[in-house]
Amino acid sequence: MPQASAYAIDGPTGRFSRTTIERREPGPTEVLFDVAYAGICHSDIHTARGEWGPTTYPLVPGHEIAGVVREVGTDVTRFAVGDRVGVGCFVDSCGECEQCRAGDEQFCDGPGGTIWTYNAIGRDGVPTAGGYSTCFTVEQDYLCRIPSSIELANAAPLMCAGITLYSPLKRWGAGPGKRVAIVGMGGLGHMGVQIAAAFGAEVAVISQTRSKEADGRRFGATEYYALSEPGTVKGLRKSFDLIISTVSGDQNLNSLLGCLRTGGALVDVGLPEHPVQLSLGALVGQRRILAGSQIGGIAETQEMLDFCAAHGLAAQVEVIGGEDINDAYDRVVASDVRYRFVIDTATF
Ligand SMILES: [Zn+2]
Ligand SMILES: [Zn+2]
């Protein structure tokens, strides 16, 4: 069995330490690849700290994974040794239900549902382990190809942050003539600004402060607003066709709804720990839409990667070593990262 060096956490208040895990020998249609980089997503932190319900420990998180193929199974047709590849938030699904057939494997209705990259049980009956590890075995249908123009470190966060923004921006019609606001300038938001601008929309950032304004404008925003400044929300009343909220902490959805034009849509992709208060008058009164979105299917993820390559987009990252994961978690929670930490597995 292929052995992987990995970083695991042993409980909700634990710390990450180095360990060794086993990966499957690749089956006939599976691919074994060497992980080069794994991004740190806020979801990793919520799961590692047990904030989203039960977590199975020890946990190896990581669902923003980029690497290079080491070995392919006998029947693999889509990938070859040496290919640059990525894995995102899930590694399996039934492949037969309505959602899977529509390319929305992230909403699989099959008996086992969508098999998440970590904190789930894989097809071999073994708990899944994520990308904070040096190698990874996956079915070829759940693997994406990373275009050669995107560095692996900058590509890893696209596998969650990139697709999480690309999918709703596309579905809800971000494009020429549309005013789009991205709420939050973190790992998700900084991809949202770039992608919305590349779609041709007029892009605004709504952030807590102006500390990231120069970056936001460099990523393609033409307007930048700080919620910490009094009167900001009032001044944006009925301003946007589409608002994507990436905030995973507590937020005031009623204020954001008021910033939508008549018939506009607010799409939430953040998952706060606590329920939010919603005043339905803000929806009903202006025929507004409140929607959610969760990553995207494999085909759409590949489409996003190709789109990013064609438009010169990628994640801006801070590369860290395995020993730095504990500190990095605290810095992500404090919004002190520009804009994604990626772990270099060569340091394991
Ligand atoms: Zn994620
Ligand atoms: Zn399915």
Image (cartoon, rainbow, N blue to C red):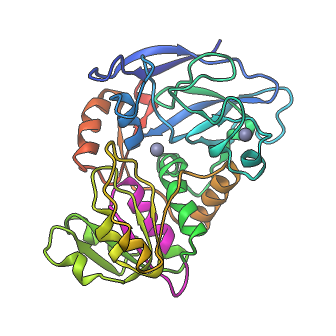
Instruction: Check residue 347 for magenta coloring.
Output: no
Instruction: Check residue 184 for magenta coloring.
Output: yes
Residue at the farthest bottom position: 177
The residue under the point 38% across, 17% down is 18
| In the image: residue 265, left or right of residue 14 | right
Dividing the picture into quarters, in which one does residue 117 lie?
A: top right
Residue 12: x and y in percent read: 31, 23
The residue under the point 51% across, 48% down is 160
Dividing the picture into quarters, in which one does residue 348 lie?
A: top left
Residue at the farthest left position: 230
Residue 30: x and y in percent read: 75, 29
Pick whichever, 219 or 112, lies toward us: 112
Q: Is residue 241 above or below residue 109?
A: below
The residue under the point 25% across, 50% down is 335
Residue 213: x and y in percent read: 26, 71
The reply to whether residue 243 is in sight is yes
Image quadrant holding the N terminus, namely: top right
Pick whichever, 181 or 344, lies toward us: 181
The reply to whether residue 40 is in sight is no
Give, as a single range, the part of the protein colored magenta: 175-196
Residue 271: x and y in percent read: 40, 48
Give the tally of numbered discs. 0
Pick whichever, 297 or 241, lies toward us: 241
Dividing the picture into quarters, in which one does residue 105 lie?
A: top right
| In the image: residue 19, left or right of residue 184 | right
The residue under the point 22% across, 46% down is 334
